[in-house]
Image (spheres, rainbow, N blue to C red):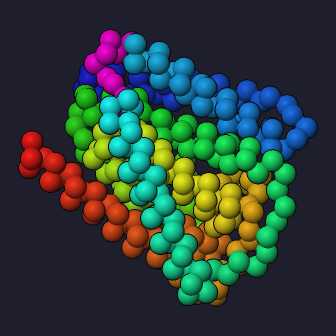
Amino acid sequence: MKKALITFMKIAVFFMGWAVCTAIDIPAEDPAVWRFFAELVPLASMILFTIVFILIEKKNVRIPIAANAREGTLVGTIAGIIWISVSAGILIATHQLVITGKNHIQILWLWMLSAFINVIMQELLVRGYIYQLLKTKYDLPVAIVVSTALFSLMHGGAFEAGLLPVVNVITMCLFTTALYEVEGTLLAPIMAHAVWNVVGGVILGGVSLADDYPSLYSMTPSENVILSGGICRIEGSIVVLIVNIALMLIFLRSARKRQNKD
């Protein structure tokens, strides 16, 4: 009981302290610049709190980043490309999602950078200190359950859209967690997640980001909500659920192979 209470208090202080710091608003006239700082402040706060709490743990809890960094970055990037390419490709090819227009976006690269920064922050929150603390103090299943719940709550809009979008969010998290565990570096899920958000959100406009994010293209879903994803577009489609499960099984199989070799 004491162990659980101490662990809960650490997570609560970590999360609440970070949440308070994210309230800092840096005013900017340009929407792209404002969004950049709106993503940078939470990331900087997350890095600061992560470093402080890791030091408090006296190296008992570590976040793997440098280990296997090159291979992890490559595998994560390839996984992300396959993830969004197969999902969006099937939906566009079958006319479940139709590209209906192209938009002019000022400082497109800055919007893309902001989306990337947001991904780093999310991954540090979901699979950083909290994940490693639970994995160390308890076991991997506990860390997976809590991190998946946290990731799902961060995408609260899915709950308003229906059951399928929620299941998609959960399986997205499980897939990227499997990728994380196989590659042994946070860079792997960061790259896969970044490709998904930047290409799917900022470029195609089929992945939900913050409301003020523009997209280079506009996509219109068909009337078949289960296939097209409806208002959620790519992230609400059953196609994505199938792709998520397939990728998750691939990396779980890879993990078992590595365990057998060891």
Q: Position of residue 55 (x, y in %)?
A: 40, 13
- Compared to residue 58, the image places residue 88 above or below, namely below
Q: Main secondary structure of the magenta part?
A: loop
Image quadrant where residue 249 sits = bottom left
Q: Residue at x 32, y 36 (%)?
A: 68
- Compared to residue 39, the image places residue 98 above or below, namely below
Q: Position of residue 6 (x, y in %)?
A: 34, 21
Q: Residue at x 28, y 57 (%)?
A: 251
For residue 220, say whether it is visible: yes
Image quadrant where residue 252 sits = bottom left
Foreground pick, 240 / 81? 81
Q: Position of residue 134 (x, y in %)?
A: 31, 33
Q: Position of residue 39 (x, y in %)?
A: 67, 37
Quarter of the picture holding the C terminus? top left
For residue 236, say whether it is visible: no
Q: Is residue 262 left or right of residue 211?
A: left
Foreground pick, 115 / 3? 115
- Compared to residue 160, the image places residue 126 above or below, namely above
Q: Is residue 238 left or right of residue 177?
A: right
Q: Residue at x 58, y 55 (%)?
A: 197
Q: Provide the residue span drawn in magenta.
A: 56-64
Residue 62 colored in magenta in the image: yes
How many numbered marks, from 0 up? 0
Q: Residue at x 46, y 76 (%)?
A: 239
Residue 235 colored in magenta in the image: no
